[in-house]
Structures are given as C-alpha cells and as structure tokens.
Amino acid sequence: MTGLIRVTRPGVATVDTAEGRFAVGRGGIREAMNGDEVQVSLSTRRGGERLAYVQAVLMRATTTFAGTYADAAPLGIVVPLDGRIRRDFFVLPEDDSASRLGVSDGDVVSARILEYPARHSSGVVTLDRRLGGADDLDLDMESVIASYDLATDFPEECCEQVEPVRVDVESALAGDPCRRDLRDRSCMTVDPTDARDFDDAVGARRVEGGYEVDVHIADVTHYVPWDSPVDREARRRTCSVYLADRVLPMLPEKLCNDVCSLVPGSDRLCMSVLMRLDVHGNVTSFEVAPSAIRSRARLDYDTVDALLDGRAEEASLPAVEGGPEAIAGQLRILDEVASLRREVRSLRGAIDFETREAKVILDERGKPQGVSVRERTRATGLIEEAMLMANECVASLLSQSDVPVAYRVHERPSHEDLKETLPVLGELGLLHGDLAERLVSGDPMAMQEVLRAAHGTQAEYLASSVLLRAQKRAVYLPRNDGHYALGARAYCHFTSPIRRYPDDTVHRALKALLHGELGSKEQARVAEALPQLCRDCSDRERVADSASRASQKVKMAELFSGHVGEDFSGMVVGVERYGLFVALDDTCAEGLLPVRALGDEWFAYDERLLSLTGEESGKRWRPGQRVAVTVTGTDPAHGRIDFALAGSVSREWAQRGRLQA
C-alpha cells in the first residue's frame, strides 16, 4: 500500500495509509525521508502488531536542507543538520557552487538535492546559499530547528500584507455595531518576565452576590482575513514554537509584538468574555463580544506573587493609569476567585497533576548561565483559572449553537491503560475498598483519591507518573467530545490566538455567530477545512513541544559541561531496561544513570512495576526514589547528560567524563 512517512527521530517513523497509521519496523525506513510518499509492505510480528517497511519512494517531499559543508577535494560533503537524514551528500567536482558562494570548510549551507541517495549510491547536491560560519551560528540549535522542520522566515507576501496594518480602534468601533467600548473598565496583563506578546488581559470586581471577571483576548482575526497570505502561513505553522534561545512565531512580529499585543496605556481590539460568578465561584451568566480595551498595567508573575504573599507594597505595582491600589485590589479578587474555581473543578472531577518547568537562562550570546524553574504559584494560578473559565464559556456557547470549530478534546483513559496502573498503586498501598474497581472504570474522583493519599509521601511521584501515563493526549477535533481531565462538558482554546491557530478558528466562529453569518461562504470553507486542520494542529503541537524540550536539553547539557565531576541530588523519574533517568532537584536537569553504573551485577527489569532489581543484592530502583549522582559526561549536540552514583565514580570514570565534555 502507499502512504506518507513521518520520521519523528533518527530511525523512528510512522506511515499514514488509507488503512491507518503503522509504525515502521527497525531498518524499514531505508532511503525514504520525512514527508515522502512511499510504497510499503506490512509484516505482522508476534503479539499482532503490524509494522511497515518501505519498498519504494514514489514522491519526494524534501528538496532542500541545511547542512555543514566539508571540503574533501575533489568532492565537497554536506552533512545534514536534520538528524533524521542519516546520509551525507556529495558536491561533485564540476560543481562550482562552493567557490562561487564563498563557502569554506565548516560553513553552514542550504543545499538543493539533485540526486537522492539510493541503496547503493550516495546523494548529490548543489549549494544554494551560505547560511553562516560555524562561529556565527549555534549549530546545535540550528540542528533542532532543521530536525523538527520548523519554519523561520516569513514569505515575502506575508510581510507585504502586514506592512500597512495599523491599530485603528475608532474605525473598528464605528464599523461594527457588535463591538463594545470597554476602555473605561480597568484591566491588566500578567505574563512571564521575558514575554513580548501580551495576548490576554484580565479584570475583576466584587459585586452583590458574587464577582464579575473580565477576560480580554487580542482580536487577531480582525487583522488577518481568512485565506490571506498571513492566514495560510499561520495554518501551515499552526503554533508558535518556544525554543531555549528564540521564539519562532506563528504570526509576523508586527502583529505579535505590536498591533495585536495588549501593551499598557494603548487602545487595542479584543474579543472579550464578561462573566458573572456567585459567591461559590460558579459562573451564573456570561457575555461574549468584540471589544476595545485599554490595559492599565503590564505585570509579571514574580511581581504579582510578591504582592499576594505580602513581600511587596501596592505602590510598587507599575500601573500606567488608575493607580496601583486599584490594580492590587483586582489581583486579590482574582486570587480569591481562582481558589473558588479550583474547588468547583475538583467537585466535578477535574484532575490536576503538579508540574515543574525548567528554562535555561542564556546570556546575550546564547550561552547558558543558570536555570529558572517555574512551578504553579498564586500568580500563575489566578491567570490559569481565568483562562480556563473563559475557554469553557466560549465552548459552551459554540457547542449549544452547534457551531463547527476546533474543540479541545481529552478522552477518558481506556480500561486497559488504567488496569496497568493497579500493580504499582497496589504495591504502594494506595488502593482500598472498591477504589481499584472505580479507578479502572475511569472515575475521576477515584483518581483524585489516589493522588490525595499519595501527596507528601515517598509514593507521590510514582503514583502521579503511572496515572499520568495512563491518560490520553488532548487533541483538536471538529466536534465537542468534552475534556476529561478538566471535568468540562465543552472546552476549546480561545485565549491565545497570537500563538495557536485553533484559537483563531474559535474567534472566527464567534464573530460569525454574533453577526448572524454562520451560513456565509467563508464559514462553509472553514468547516470544510476543519477536520484536516484539527489533525495538523494536533500533530504540529506535538512537534513544537518536542522541539522545545530538545532545545532545552541542548542548552542544559551545554550548561552541565562545566560541572563534570560534581555531585548533585535528584530523583529517579524514569526506569528503563538500560538504566535510570534522574532529574536533579535544583535545575530539573535530566540525565541517564546507565545500568552499568548501578553495580557489578545483573539487574532485572520489571515493566509492570517500573523497576530494576539487582539479582544478587536485591536492590530495587523505581521512580520517585532519592539518589545522589555525579555528572560523568555530557553531549550537548544530542542534549545528553550522563550520571554515575555519587561516591562510586573512579578516576577513570571522571577522566572519561571530562574528555567527553
């Protein structure tokens, strides 16, 4: 059969065919490259899994790639930066492109494929342009960009479209009777310290019988018409990608950081959700409308946390209008509402998994200087709850009106996946009464009980890990199937249209609903494109997440190259047949403690209990255990850090680690 091959990492791929998606067997990629249309055969291995093997490439998807040039006279050699392309390409002696472009040994170039590699012959390329020297570019990061097919520059037609765009609030208000002027309502933005695009603002008031909470989201679709050059490019990218050293935006910078960004003291166009809540935090009514707003302050999470924790005075808030006292009052109300909303969501079965996010701090040259670890705080919580609430309100409105949009759907875990958690949870002593039966049935309350019982104990990490692993991944679908983990009957992404394309589909649908234009030709074209668009957005979201993690690992390994031979404390976060993955306490840096470093004995791997056990000593290793390790080596190009048990590192180990670094 035929299909499209997707190479996810070196040697690992899937093929999408008319009969479904199949994993490619070991060695089965052969001469195919990512995105190629291929002919495959299927083989069934023990256990019933069907694996694909490429027999022929029918149509090529990759025509150019970035690589490092090496002069091997009389030939030139181009080594692809994309790690998924596992072959080198030659520049033939009669090709003068290297000398014509001034390319030297070690330069990074853009190469165009003239002949594709076959089973018994090498590929041939010519050089299109010199991208830079090895000293000018961070090759490890360029390799991440190439390996994940990340778009960098915008096409010229996109730049031409946005060049004349200007903010004109008065014209927008005059031209749209549905647009509300909310510039007299106080609101603010709260984002990470290094944020440059501010796409959401919040405000709150205490009223009789409860609260009013306003969420204002940048009105991107006012400036980006459907099927315009910028819209088509945004659909191709589907989301912004946040790498360790840069952001690859979904939209041109003029829109992200200027026209659509809710900068303080400036009038901006938004889509607003105005919500009324009772004293218990339940939403009693809401209104959605295009609007014009004016942010009173640009705040960061650290500043808001300092205020709420009593470490900062109200007067220190950087309000541009209305006074810092008013801003502080709204923040306290939002904090109060967030606490109520968490209780509301818990009562309906929402499941919260605690997470920590590590970000390597870089200097102006892109060199790592340290690590910032972000955890959930009161400041992040009040924004998160406001956004969740707005997303639910919008989704319920669209769902009730049967409007096709990209809903955010999270399915209930399967019985089989939940059943696999029982051996671990039972051994941890976390199952009692009918809890196991309820858990396997997918009862979210049972999951909450397990997490509460494990909280603060040595079993917390392992219990959370196995339950998280049993969850399905949330995806975008053109229909509302609810969101299991949030306990929401309807959910969509509405609050980040600058960096997520599904949010733009929601904004367009809302405007069509509010203006009575659901039957328009544009909405018909959107509905026709929606199924494929949802698949693309789900797939590219996974790619963006993987690329972001890979870039952080590269810079983390680069940082720890200066700490070879040093000891650190950490926690086992993963167990595999070949060793333990350990995350360090202070930085969340993750590395491999290979099984050979655990002791001079055979270790048996138990996949059911996620453990490695020494056959002679009986020593057992599992996720959640504390461990002290020594950094023995790093490989920044592949984002790898190697560990040994602290105190067991010989001079030979340490010396080998320093040589590797």
Image: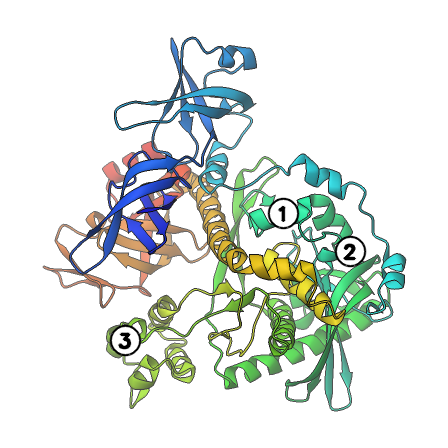
Q: Is residue 170 above or below residue 429?
A: above
Whether residue 411 sits left or right of residue 204 in the image: it is: left
Task: Give coordinates of residue 581: x percent, y percent.
Answer: 32, 54
From the image, state whether disc 3 or disc 2 is nearer to you.
3
Element type at marker 1? Answer: helix
Q: Nearer the viewer, mark 1 or mark 3?
A: 1
**Which amino acid lies under the numbered mark 1 shown in the image of this protein?**
Arg
User: Sequence order check: which comes first, mark 3 or mark 2?
Assistant: 2
**Local crowd size for mark 1, using a 10 Å CA cut-off: few (<14), some (14–19), many (≥20):** some
The first of marks 2 and 1 along the sequence is: 1
Looking at the image, residue 49 sits to the left or right of residue 116; the answer is left
Residue of label 3: 419
The residue at 51%/10% (across/down) is: 99
Residue 460 location, x and y as percent?
A: 37, 72
Q: CA distance from mark 1 to mark 3?
A: 44 Å
What amino acid is at disc 2?
Val
Which residue is at the far left? Answer: 616
Mark 2 → mark 1, Cα distance in angstroms: 26 Å
Front residue of 366/114: it is: 114
| 3D distance between C-alphas at marks 3 and 2 | 50 Å
Q: Choose top left, top right, bottom left or bottom right for residue 247.
A: top right
- Residue type indicated by callout 3: Lys
The disc label shown at residue 232, or none: 1
Q: Which residue is mark 2?
A: 263
Residue 574 in the image, given as x and y percentages of width and height:
32, 59
Residue at figure coordinates x 81%, y 62% from the top left:
319
Residue ID at (49%, 15%) = 104
Q: Is residue 135 visible?
A: yes
